[in-house]
Image: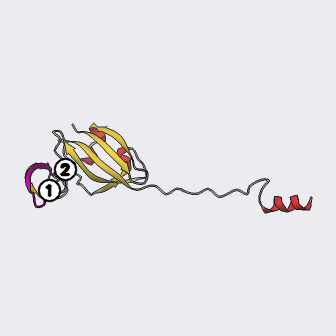
Amino acid sequence: MAKFKIIVADPETGKSKTVELEETRAVPLIGRKIGETIDGSVVGLSGHKVRITGGSDKDGFPMRPDVHGGVRRNILLSGGVGFKPKTKGQRRRKTLRGNVITDEVVQINMKIVEKPKRVKKAEKPSEGGGEAAEKTAEAA
């Protein structure tokens, strides 16, 4: 069965959290594509919305958003995910994984795109402070 290591990044704080999903908890992610926004309760962040940004398979080949399907392919690249050219115009054929999450994917990268709205509590009038306390202090 599927076992995923999920890395969830929070762009606001710059921190990331690692979550491991196995068996039935991992099933909702199978068949999803890079760029999809899903409910955060799948990875233990209820109320959040998270976007799938990438991942890698069991042999370390990265997922690329513009490669369709969940299979490995040899693609001629001039830059982007999976290849950084050393010289201008350099191209190279590299093996990459498609943009669909399958059982062979081990690591999935996500980022938080929406946090739950916090309800502000009604402010209580402060005791022993404020303008009323200042006026009584002046009168005395």
Residue type for callout 2: Met
**What residue occupies the far front of the structure in this picture?**
87
**Mark 2 sits on what residue?**
63
- Residue 121 is drawn in which quadrant? bottom right
65 horizontally vs 15: left or right: left
- Three-letter code, disc 1: Val
Q: Residue at x 49, y 57 (%)?
A: 117
Instruction: Give the quadrant of the N terminus.
Output: top left
Q: Secondary structure at mark 1?
A: loop
Q: Residue at x 46, y 55 (%)?
A: 116
Q: How far apart in space, not on screen, are marks 2 and 1 (Cα)?
A: 8 Å
Closest to the observer: 140 or 99? 140
User: Where residue 110 sits in the image (x, y, percent)?
Assistant: 31, 50
Q: Which residues are magenta?
A: 85-100
Secondary structure mainly formed by the magenta segment: loop
Residue 95 lies within the magenta run: yes
Disc 2 crowd rating (10 Å Cα; few below 14, some 14-19, many 20+) is many
User: In this figure, which residue is indicated by the disc labeled 1?
Assistant: 67
Q: Is residue 106 left or right of residue 122?
A: left
User: SS at mark 2?
Assistant: loop
